Every structure is written in structure tokens, then in C-alpha cells.
Image (cartoon, helix red, strand yellow):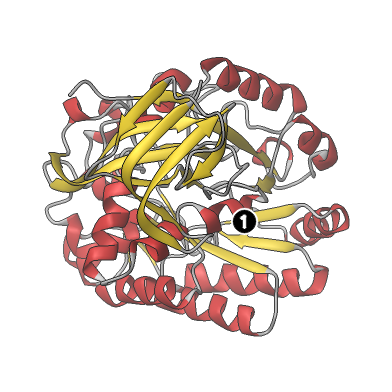
Amino acid sequence: MNIHIKNGRVIDPKNKLDAQRDVYIAAGKIAAIGTAPGGFAADRVIDASGLVVVPGLIDLAARLREPGYEYMATLESEMDAAVAGGVTSLACPPDTEPPLDEPGLVEMLKHRARNLNQAHVYPVGALTAALQGQELTEMAELVDAGCVAFSQADAPLTDTRVLMRAMQYAATFGFSVWLRPQDSFLAKNGVAHDGEVATRCGLPAIPVCAETIALATMLSLAQQTGVRLHVCRVSSAAGVEMVRAAKQQGLPVTCDVSMNHVHLSEMDIGFFDPNCHLIPPLRSLRDCAALRAGLLDGTIDAICSNHAPVDDDAKQLPFAEAEPGATGLELLLPLVLKWAQQDQLALADAFAKVTLQSAQILGLDAGHLSVGAAADVCVFDPEAWWKVEPAALKSQGKNTPFNGLELQGKVRYTLVNGQLVYQPNL
């Protein structure tokens, strides 16, 4: 199908474009920007007057809950949520049931996602068998099945010898290792940042040193092995500073942050709001400010939703007993806009954190609107306000700290490979 998107404000971080242009799509690719290619006849015209046209968003952490946790969410519900949020590519962590440690499981997930014909799904394979932290998985076979990187998700890997061997294996074949820095012993049973709120509320705490000690180990082993290390969900000022120093030393390290941690702090726990029980925990206002500074100076490469739908029964419990996690696929775009507005950042620079730079971490040629590139496109209304409430979310998980708030920025069209996969009923 040939599609002509006219009169939109086109923002493309890779090509340094932020101007009103027409976009022409043919055979699933970007055919031209600005002037129609010769002989182009549109099967469909989308009038994007007053709207913004950007590359489809790329989310580095979205739990689809399949296989194994279909009572929390299904592939169908979360893929609907993804395209409704303008997300055209997403990486899913390996902590399913069973974990993504066998090629057959990865191939099944890829096949199911492909049949839905919506967003692209890129599985992150388990680093160790069953995420037990003892035996390495067959990484080469998992890559052949479709894995883009390897991770322990939130499962601990306490044996540093196993971790070093995993990094050596990955480095030998050029695979990327994604790790979330948290010392499992220091964080044991903790549910909140070790600060005044946890103390006042009597909540078991997770100190910042749980992050920095684990991060120091990872960075030291990465330096030793030469592996490409991606640090997932950094949450503290000290953690940001360590990543900054590692990058200055020339280590091949990248880093992301959850959008929740860009906007929220421990103060938002309030009166034990279980929607604010997250992994990693919401930290201090100082940490939040350091995360924003890290985004601005390039220390933090990408923002992700850290999408983790949870069923209502598991959330409607006392804070410390509630299942951690928040839904986020449909909130990523408006929260990136909110961050850009608050920090007075150009939209091209803000969207680079959820398009181009996310694609680079995944090793994909995506996240841009270059001629010949796959036509993964998000068209949104930057002025539209909407209220975050269960009825407004397509995700099966309705759990978010932003429930009840009004956010600015609403997706109007999402295209994947040149096919219109989302258009709301206005």
C-alpha cells in the first residue's frame, strides 16, 4: 500500500530533521521525504496537519507475560497496547515461565508475534539456564532463534565466576549482555529506597550501595572480558556517575533508565501506593535529578517503559506484599514529551532516546525515517490531553503510578512496515 502522510511536522533525530514535510511510503519502506517520487500514486492519504511524525518508538524493556503469565497479560493485549502507544519495536526480557533459555521457546514467541502483524518483538535470551545463575545457555543457538542480547532480567547471578564466563562467551561471539545492577544480598526483601520515606513508613529498604556494588563488579568484568555491556534501569546518582566514568575510560558500555524514575521519586509512594512499588525502587529527589542530568549529557543512552503489567489482585495488597511493576507502553510517548518540556529539550533530542539510540543498543538499523528504511512511523497529536485511567489503557495491566493524571500527547496513527496498525476511533 502506498501511503502519503501530508502536512505533518516531521522529526527525525538521525537526519537532523525537524520541519513540515510530506512523507511518502511505498512497499513498506520510506520512499521519499518532502517531494513525491516519480510515478507515486497514494492508496491512502493521512492528513497530519497539526500532528508530529516521528520514527516508531523502540522500547528496551516490555514484559509481554507470555509464555506462562497469561493471567497478567497476553501477547494480543500487550501488542495492542504497544501500537496504541506508538511503539513499533520492543525488546522483551527473558523472565517468562519457562524462561527464554531454549531456541524453541524463542521461535514460538517470535512466530506468535509475527502472526499478530503488529509491533516487532525482539526477545532477550536468558544468560543462564532457567535464570538460575549456574549454567550458561547456548547463546549461539538462541541468537539463531532470534535473540538480540542476553540477560538475567531481575533474577540474581551471585556467582561472579559464572558471570565472567558468560561475558567471555558473549564477547567471543560479539553478543551483548544486559544486566540490571543490584546486589541480591543487600537488596534482600527490600521494597523501597533506603531513605526517609522507607524509614517513616517502616518499609524494608534497598540501599543505593546494592546498585553500586553490583555495578562495580559488572564494569570490572566488562573491562576484563571486553564484552558489550548494557546497564539496565540505573536508578541512582552514584550509579550514573559510575557509568559516566566507565564511558570516559572507553568501555563499551550503554545504559538505560525507566521513564518512571525520570518523573517520580520515593516521595510519590505517599500513603503506601502499591502502584509505586517498582523494580528498581523509586529513589530520592537528588537521584531523580541526577538521572535527568545523565540523560542530558549522554551518560544515559535511552529511556524505556519498563512495562510490567500485573493483575489487579496482585497489586491490591499492602505495599510490601504487592507485585512490583507498572504498565507503561502507552505512557512512554507522553512521558517523554513531558520530560522534554520540563527540561526544555528539543523534541529531536528527546525522541532520540526512544528511537535511534534504542535501536543502536539493540543492534538494529531502525529508529529513523531515512529513504529506504522500513516505514515504522508514529503520528501523534502533541496538544491532545488525555486522562490515564483503566478504561483508557489497552494493556491488560492497569497498574501505573500515573493513574488519574492528565498527560499531553496522544498517538493518532501507528504504521509498521508501511501498514497502518493503529488508528483510534475519534
Residue furthest right in the image: 172
Q: Is residue 280 left or right of residue 182?
A: left
Q: Residue at x 32, y 55 (%)?
A: 336
Residue 212: percent from left, percent from top: 52, 73
Q: Position of residue 130 (x, y in %)?
A: 68, 35
The structure residue drawn at horizontal position 43% and vertical position 75%, both measured from the top left corner, is 294
Residue 147 location (% of width, % of height): 70, 38
**Dot 1 crowding, Cα within 10 Å, few <14, some 14–19, many 20+:** some
Query: Measuring 25% from the left and 29% from the top, which residue is drawn there?
Result: 393
Amino acid type at mark 1: Gln
- In the picture provided, is 85 more to the left or to the right than 213? left
Q: Is residue 260 above or below residue 402?
A: below
Q: In the drawing, does residue 303 fall left or right of residue 283?
A: right
Give the total of numbered labels. Answer: 1
> Is residue 72 at all visible to an observer of this figure?
no
Q: Compare residues 105 and 146 and report the one nearer the observer.
A: 146
Secondary element at tag 1:
helix
Look at the picture and state if 67 lies above or below 30: above
Q: Residue at x 76, y 27 (%)?
A: 103
Q: Quadrant of residue 313?
A: top left
Looking at the rendered image, the quarter that the C terminus falls into is top left
Q: Which residue in the structure is indicated by mark 1?
A: 360
User: In the current view of this chain or complex, which residue is farthest to the front?
Assistant: 38
